[in-house]
């Protein structure tokens, strides 16, 4: 089959690789209908997350059709149209039983690569480094889905393929980020980053009861999406003093909750951003923490900081601000299996339609060009979608 492979820093190629096979009786083989880029992919493409190997098939946000099932699969069958969360979860361990699916104890065969840094291994992820299991990714014609009865969710009639696609990762990550905020009626939620995850967090905040949502970004087309599709008020950090503006917009108190949907390659302005750029280029730190630091400063006293952007090792993390302001910090990689049923219900009722994120479509053979446009935000690209 054909698949998009990582062959080194910023070196992506579409190659012929072996077709996936049933390995475990709980597996299914999925014919990929659509897959899409994700901002977290850029971190290993740019070389900031190690343990990639030449020839690795990448991609973790996808939907498709079941074409083959293992002997112990009970909930799906050939012909089913399904969407799959990016984290692979067994459904039976202590963490899965508590809806902490991205922390699954049983799906990362390379625990020794994570334990020195994290202390304990997380779940595996499709196409996301060998530290996260070394699983083949979804930018391919076919993909193996382990623990299919836990990871495959039937797409209801009335939900189209592009809507389902973004409920694989962007939707549940954004929804989880809003859910972490413990939103009460009347709350104001500020979201840093108007990419796919940020836009989903904005819409989700309203679904969970927020009165106001404020989007912070710099790209006019993304701020327009935040306003037109998510109903958010907007701030352009290249023109607005974000901290002063947020105080003014909230009567001097600050947002009740702040969501960081940016992660380790944040853009920004000023001396601090320049410092991070230099240290990151020299591999003296992995993260540019501009957005996260600003969110910490902006959040009201006693508020909630929700972090769904991906981070590694950051300098100058203002933990003293977190302590003295009494902030609640919640963060995780997405527990997609916990959120997908309600996200599909929102989609069926017309309350959540993420299909507008698909700004560009490419055949799989042109996937390297799609990632280039996505990374450089060319032509207003928010997400590039690949059709095998």
Image (cartoon, rainbow, N blue to C red):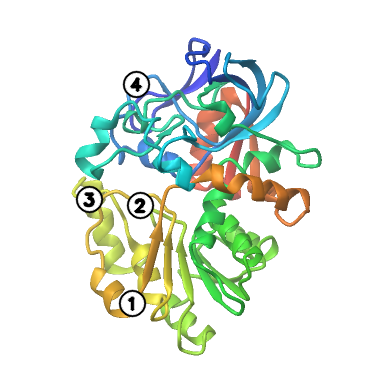
Assign a secondary structure to mark 1.
loop
What residue appears at the point 61 percent right and 32 percent down from the top-left corner? 152
Who comes first in sequence, dot 1 or dot 4?
Answer: 4
Residue hosting label 3: 285
In this rendering, position of residue 81 left or right of residue 100: right
Res. 184 image quadrant: bottom right
Residue 54 numbered tag: 4
Of 75 and 220, the residue lying toward us: 75
Is residue 172 positioned above or below 110 on the image?
A: below
Who comes first in sequence, dot 2 or dot 1?
Answer: 2
Is residue 169 positioned above or below 331 on the image?
A: above
In this rendering, position of residue 65 left or right of residue 158: left
Of 47 and 258, the residue lying toward us: 258
Give neighbour class at mark 1: few <14, some 14-19, many 20+ (Cα, 10 Å): some
Find the distance from the CA under tag 2 to the CA under tag 3: 10 Å
Give neighbour class at mark 3: few <14, some 14-19, many 20+ (Cα, 10 Å): some
In this rendering, position of residue 153 left or right of residue 367: right
Q: Are marks 2 and 4 in contact (CB under 8 Å)?
A: no
Front tag of 2 and 1: 1
Residue hosting label 1: 326
Q: Are marks 2 and 3 in contact (CB under 8 Å)?
A: no
Residue hosting label 2: 264
Is residue 310 positioned above or below 367 on the image?
A: below
Is residue 64 positioned above or below 308 on the image?
A: above
Who comes first in sequence, dot 3 or dot 1?
Answer: 3
Assign a secondary structure to mark 3.
loop
Residue lying at the far right of the rendered structure: 158
Who comes first in sequence, dot 3 or dot 4?
Answer: 4
What residue appears at the point 32 percent right and 79 percent down from the top-left corner? 325
């Amino acid at each position: 089959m054909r698949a998009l492979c990582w062959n080194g820093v910023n070196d992506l190629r579409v190659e012929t690789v072996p077709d996936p096979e049933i390995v475990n009786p709980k597996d299914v083989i999925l014919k990929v209908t659509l897959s899409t880029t994700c901002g977290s992919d850029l971190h290993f493409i740019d070389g900031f997350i190690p343990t990639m190997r030449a020839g690795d098939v990448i991609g973790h946000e996808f939907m498709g059709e079941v074409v083959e099932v293992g002997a112990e699969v009970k909930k799906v069958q050939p012909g089913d149209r399904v969407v799959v969360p990016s984290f692979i979860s067994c459904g039976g361990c202590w963490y899965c039983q508590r809806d902490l699916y991205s922390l699954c104890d049983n799906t990362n065969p390379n625990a020794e690569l994570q334990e020195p840094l994290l202390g304990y291994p997380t779940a595996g992820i499709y196409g996301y480094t060998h530290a996260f299991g070394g699983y083949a990714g979804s930018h391919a014609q076919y993909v193996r889905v382990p623990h299919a009865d836990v990871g495959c969710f039937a797409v209801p009639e009335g939900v189209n393929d592009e809507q389902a696609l973004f409920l694989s990762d962007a939707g549940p990550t954004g929804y989880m980020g809003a859910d972490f905020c413990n939103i009460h009626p009347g709350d104001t939620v500020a979201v840093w980053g108007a990419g796919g995850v940020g836009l989903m967090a904005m819409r989700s905040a309203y679904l969970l009861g927020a009165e106001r949502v404020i989007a912070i970004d710099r790209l006019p087309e993304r701020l327009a999406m935040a306003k037109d599709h998510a109903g958010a008020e907007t701030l352009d950090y290249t023109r607005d003093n974000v901290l002063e503006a947020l105080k003014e917009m909230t009567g001097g108190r600050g947002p009740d909750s702040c969501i960081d949907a940016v992660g380790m390659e944040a853009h920004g302005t000023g001396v601090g951003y320049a410092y991070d750029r230099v240290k990151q280029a020299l591999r003296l730190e992995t993260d540019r923490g501009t957005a996260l630091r600003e969110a910490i400063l902006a959040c009201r006293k006693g508020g909630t900081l929700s972090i769904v952007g991906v981070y590694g090792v950051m300098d100058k993390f203002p933990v003293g601000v977190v302590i003295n302001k009494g902030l609640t910090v919640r963060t995780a990689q997405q527990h997609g299996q916990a959120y997908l049923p309600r996200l599909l219900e929102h989609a069926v009722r017309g309350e959540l339609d993420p299909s507008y994120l698909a700004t560009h479509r490419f055949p799989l053979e042109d996937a390297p060009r799609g990632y280039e446009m996505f990374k450089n935000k060319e032509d207003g690209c928010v997400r590039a979608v690949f059709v095998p």
